[in-house]
Image: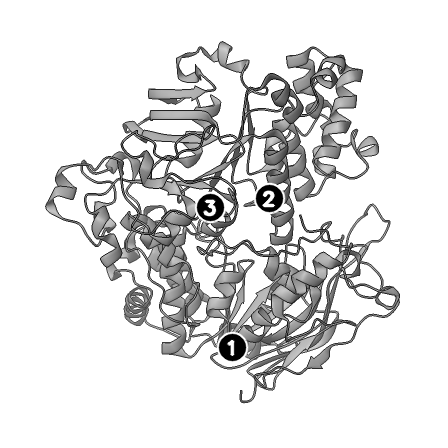
Amino acid sequence: MSEPLLTIEGLTKTFHVARSASGNTRLKALDGISLTVGRGETLGLVGESGCGKSTLARTLMMLETPDEGTVTFEGTNPFGLRGKELLSWRRRVQMVFQDPFASLNARMNAGDIIAEPWATHRGLYPTSRERQARVSELLHMVGLRPSDARKSPQEFSGGQRQRIGIARALALNPDVIILDEPVSALDLSVQAQVLNLLNELQQELGVSYIFISHDLTVVRHVADRVAVMYLGRIIETGATEEVFDHPRHPYTAALMSASPKLDVSGTRRDRIVLQGELPSPLDPPSGCRFRTRCWKAQDICAEVSPEPQVLAAPDGTRHVAECHFPLDSLKGLTGAAATATATSAVPVQ
Amino acid sequence: MKTAAQQAPIQRTGEAARAATGQTKAHDVVLQVRDLAVDIRTHRGTVRAVNSVAFEARAGETLALLGESGCGKSMTAKALAGIMDPVCDLADGEIVLNGTDLAALSAKERLKFAGPELGIVFQDALTALNPVYTVGTQLGEAFRIHRGLSAKEARVEAIDLMKRVGIPEPESRINSYPHQFSGGMRQRILIAMAVALNPRLLIADEPTTALDVTVQAQIMQLLRKLREEGQMAVILITHDLAVVAEEADTVAVMYAGNVVESGPVSEVFADPRHPYTKGLLESVPVHLERGAKLKSIAGSPPELHDIPSGCVYQSRCPLVQDICRAERPVLRPVAGDRPVAGAHPVAGDRPVAGAAGIGGTPVNIPSGAQPRPARTAACHFSEEISNV
């Protein structure tokens, strides 16, 4: 991969909450996030609810200001920009939301929804004729008819609404689109249509995607690289096949293992079933944040926070995991399940 | 076992109670649904949301009702449980639960079945639980109403239940309110309420859809454990093909209010005989080159007030012919072309009669086992699908 389009380093975001059970009022939603996104690349971001995925997305959209860390987008730090420069930067990062029903204004028609970003970015398509032509073009690109511009959101199905949301994100010709669970609300048969559309658009336009999803099957299909988040940290990143086939962090292995598989051969697989749930981000465990649910945890895990380790990936790609005791890459998932079963910390029934 | 059940004032586990009375054996048919139809009264006229649905659920097994949103799977569950919205009517059909046709009973008579015979778990635990009562009160309710226990006795039972579903420190958590529990724990509480009286049938309507993956695995493990312990028949309602593949023994695929295909999961998924089932299976991005084009089903399901008179799937079907527009196919037995000797892995030690049950003449069924339901599909061209 050439020079990354977007580089995030040490991003930290703390929220102050009024009160909590533990008495702690500081919630560290992001705790030193470092990531890169290449041009035309899809980065899959996976993790359970509350891990900080959405805070990261909101920070990249500049809806939150980070406490520490830097975001570099083609050499510039967007948080240092003001006025026109800031406006032109905002154009380049757009977002598609999860809920196609809540994210479209029911009082506007589809054409006005898609054209609304140009009310802020006036220079892009100055005349009404240009705007109309572009709306028709965008509708065509996402597989709708130009005549659909006059319909209101209620007249569309869930999949069609998501297409309108994608057209709106494309309206400003962005370089990066943050897709926050873009297909989770859609039925399976429609989900496939939207995934195909996203793939075609990326090949046509060379846009980068940050694809946030809890559905590992979908992420495996769309992402070039994957980042796994747990309690505000990225605990593992690497090329998609490498992370899925040879997870090195126990949490990644557990996540992959817990996710149901469509396997018609009927063989029952060994599964890692983690005990407990995500600890409260208000009161995260000391040391390694995963240690309270980890079957490999030792004393050191409670004392020392593991540093990101670059691990040897058989295919030569960069594979990083934050763990004192990374799993054996050669064994893969089955091996991890066997180890987990053998230790009493994680009973598998 | 019998003496234990007699001595104990309260029968704690379904297994002990059933073993003592010999009522339910593994794989016995617990629920038989025939020709179920549900109408909804809307301002645009009456629409049929569920149409001639038929399936059976067996003790100790899981039947999955699989379908996309609006296909009528939740409506079917509500009809079985007798908790339909006031605008819905049970238009037709039989719901035979352990010999009693629930559809023929009055609403008041059906109440007696809710709890001891039939339990239901909903998707959204926060809305299903009452926010102003402690979980102990809500868990004990079934014991107070159906068994006439005092509040104190019910509390003991509630603590016991919380232990059974794996809620840590039940003695101290019993006085907590639902909002004080995490999503996974709330779902456990809901499951505990459903299994409190050891029902024969447990309906789980998207029980893990709102949960994270690692918690989802815990809840599925719990449901499996409870199913084994109580030899319950479980009806699992879901839109997730992978969950069906991993958790269910048999599956009924629903589309636009109709069951379009049913049979043992391993056979239906390996060799689908309805174009919709096949289309769904192909929409899942597995075993594909990354970024490769997914096969998808064109279009979207018909609106309920606009269901065509012929086959319900005709507008999206690649095999559609004139006969499909003229005549609605009924569920007919289809012979799987693969050998059915290997039983479903979950069933393990049990023979699968497969095609033998088609004509109602079971062959080679060892004593005690009932004939397996044949595979069925509602398609005029079910034999040609594998060639598409």
Q: Nearer the viewer, mark 2 or mark 3?
A: 3
Q: Marks 3 and 1: in contact by CB < 8 Å? A: no
**Secondary structure under the numbered disc 1 in the rendered image:** helix
Residue designated by label 1 = A88
**Left or right: where does residue A148 sit relative to residue A190?**
left
| Mark 2 vs 1: CB contact within 8 A | no
C-alpha distance separating marks 1 and 3? 59 Å
What colour scheme has been applied to the protein in the rendered image? Answer: one colour
Badge 2 sits on which subunit? B
Image quadrant in which you'd find residue A81 = bottom right
Q: Secondary structure at mark 2?
A: helix
B89 over B320 or under it: above or below:
above
Label 1 in the same subunit as label 3? no
Q: Position of residue A118 (x, y in %)?
A: 42, 68
Provide the secondary structure element on which disc 3 rests: loop
Q: Of the numbered discs in the image, which one, if any, rests on residue B220? A: 2
Q: Please identify, in this view, whether the residue under mark 1 or under mark 3 is nearer the observer.
A: 3
Task: List x then y, in percent, for residue A297.
Answer: 81, 63
- On what subunit does the disc labeled 1 rest? A
At x 29%, y 69%, the residue is A137
- Measured Cα–Cα span from mark 2 to mark 3: 18 Å
Separation of residues labelled 2 and 1 (CA atoms) = 49 Å
Nearer to us in this view, B374 or A100: B374
For image coordinates 79% across by 57% down, the residue present is: A292
The residue that disc 3 covers is B344
Please state which amino acid type lies under the numbered disc 3. Answer: His
Front residue of this view, candidates B134 and B11: B11
Q: Is residue A201 above or below residue A73?
A: above
Crowding at mark 3 (Cα within 10 Å: few <14, some 14-19, many 20+): many
Q: Which one is in front, B211 or B165?
A: B165
Q: How many marks?
A: 3
